[in-house]
Amino acid sequence: MSNLDNFEQNFFKAFDDYETAENEDTNFMLLRSFLLATFEYFRHQNIAAKNVNDLNEKQKCHLRAKLPSILRKFQKGKTLMDLTFSLEEKDIFDYLKFRSGIEFLTEHFVSFIDDPSEFNFYSLQDAFDPREYFLTYNYEDAYKNPYPTEPLPDHSGVPESHWWWKKAEIHRIP
């Protein structure tokens, strides 16, 4: 089994776990896992020069059947907005990955939805706007730096259109 196959399995497991979870607190935890799995799967898919068209028919049918309910779930209960508001400066790496996970979903999966006009895909990215200030690494000198000191996580395979990675890199304080 290839490395990409492992990431694909993790993605579909996280996809199914999130889609079927009913407890609000569990949903919140599974949303985090789902977005991280989405990020890792699609960046590795890009590295391998693959795309969603390379999925088998069973996987494509599964996405068509379940993706709308996942998108609806983003908007009720503990939502994507709640997730971004729960993040702090120390969570900037999760912020970057979650935002890319959502971008990958909206870039690659719109073709699996029968009626894309039912969903406001821009609002998914808008959920990240209130925490965009994280990317400039702003903090008062009188306070301890709240940001992680490690280098940015591996984001090879993430396209340039995910500009937030570059902005975080440019403003990074060593």
Image (cartoon, rainbow, N blue to C red):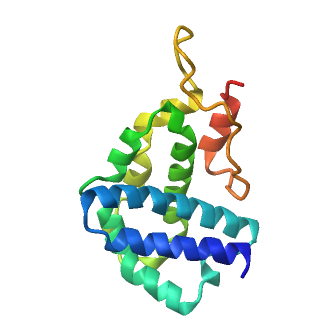
The residue under the point 75% across, 71% down is 48
Residue at far top of view = 142
Tally the marks. Answer: 0
Could you tell me which quadrant the C terminus lies in? top right
Asked whether 133 or 147 is in front, the reply is 147
**Residue depicted at x 38% and y 47%:** 83
- Where is residue 98 drawn, in percent x and y? 51, 52
Quarter where residue 116 is shown: bottom left
Left of 141 or right of it: where is 77? left
Relative vertical location of residue 63 with respect to residue 104 in this rendering, above or below? below
**Residue 119, how many percent across, how many down?**
34, 64
What residue is rendered at 61% in x and 67% in y? 41
Residue 135: percent from left, percent from top: 57, 33
Q: Against 173, is 121 above or below?
A: below
In the depicted view, which residue is nearer to us: 3 or 99?
A: 3
Q: Is residue 116 visible?
A: no
